[in-house]
Image (cartoon, helix red, strand yellow):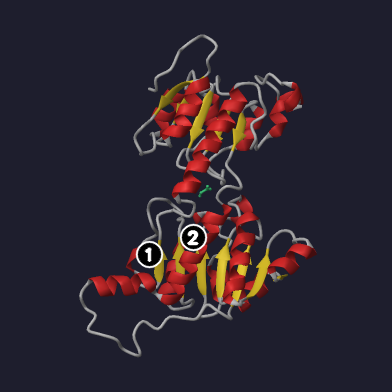
Amino acid sequence: MHAQRSGPLRPKVLITRKIFEESIAHLARHCDVDANQRDVPLTPHELIRKLQGKQGAITLLTDTISDAVLARCPDLKIVSNVAVGFNNLDVKAATERGVMMTNTPGVLDDTTADFTWCLILAASRGLVDADRYFRSGRWKGWGLMQFLGRDIHGKTLGICGLGRIGRRVAKRAKGFDMRVLYTGRTRAPEKLERELGAAFVDKRTLLKESDIVTLHVPLTPDTTHYISTAELTLMKPTAVLVNTSRGPVVDEKALVRALREGRIASAGLDVYEREPRPASGLTRLKNVVLAPHIGSASMETRLRMSNMAAENCVAGLTGRRPPNLLNPQVLKGKYKRFTKVTPEQK
Ligand code: GLV
């Protein structure tokens, strides 16, 4: 527990897992804070027990806030997720129960795009395997035919989802003189296409023509297994697949088979279908670079995300509109339950 004045009017907030002290201090100026200082997720049972009687929650993407959880925590007014992705939250159920939900968009786009490029580069040039080889002491000196990767410059980059992060990835491709294709539900404005030098194509064309395919779609029922056997079969045998979005966007078992059989050349993954467990056989493959979901993990960005989540929560509990409200309907009409609407929220 954090040092705080308690009083009947101070809302109670649970922080489910370790976040930055600076953010906890901000929350503690306005709320009574119960902070789980361990960096392991609470069990579903612990989560519900600790949430009961709390008006606010700071959640991490490892916490599932389902309708069943909300039903058992009737005092909750706001769930503030420290992530841009919110597939761990049932926003529809929260809206029906009049509970606000927020995320942390914008602040991690460049950092995640940088990391996408780390994976593109590492997977194309076999960097991690080469590092392992060097450390093992097996390297006996330079050889013309050693660790032959694939060039990146001058190739075709295929971006699935030209949202905030996809755009940043496209921008960085300019330095590599690449042809950039993109696909997605909607076409970007022409001006943006021109700025990024990106051409809109259908998914099939993108998969067939790209040397590197990178995924930046949100996880929804429509994008679950967006890449599976059929899609992997369309890709070039020399192609690289990179995923920094959400694990279930790729059918991981199908990917393991494709990598093992050489139907694509290599992959770089930051996210997995059943985190933290990889699909069977994945870690035995040499042609895949595996990161433990660290796309947004720079010191600066994670601090910004943590502070942003704290501010969303404080705003929601002190009668202000949370800056990153996912379900603004809760402030109006039939969904309005707890929220005291101040003039600036309307
Ligand atoms: C990280 O994966 C995020 O969604 O913020």
Indicate the position of residue 205 as horizontal and vertical percent values.
67, 75
Indicate the position of residue 162 as horizontal and vertical percent values.
66, 60
Q: Name the residue under label 1.
A: 282
Tell me how far mark 2 sits from mark 1, CA to CA: 20 Å
User: Is residue 25 rendered to the left or right of residue 38?
Assistant: right
Please tell me whether mark 2 or mark 1 is closer to you in this view: 2
Picture layout, residue 6 above or below residue 215: above
Q: In which quarter of the image is residue 103?
A: top right
Indicate which disc, 2 or 1, sits on the residue closer to the N terminus: 2
Q: Mark 2 points at which residue?
A: 115
Residue at the spot 29% in from the left edge and 86% down from the top edge: 142
**Extreme right residue here?**
190
Indicate the position of residue 345 as horizontal and vertical percent values.
72, 27
Picture layout, residue 151 above or below residue 4: below
Indicate the position of residue 184 as horizontal and vertical percent values.
68, 61
Q: On the rendered image, what quadrant is the C terminus found in?
A: top right
User: Is residue 211 rendered to the left or right of residue 32?
Assistant: right
**Local secondary structure at mark 2:** helix
**Extreme top residue here?**
8
Q: Do the residues labelled 2 and 1 touch (CB within 8 Å)?
A: no
Residue 66, can we see it?
no
Q: Does the residue labelled 1 lie within 8 Å of ligand 1?
A: no
Badge 1 local density, few (<14 within 10 Å), some, or many (20+)? Answer: many
**Local secondary structure at mark 1:** helix
Q: In which quarter of the image is residue 113?
A: bottom right
- Kind of residue at disc 1: Leu
User: Is residue 22 rendered to the left or right of residue 219?
Assistant: left
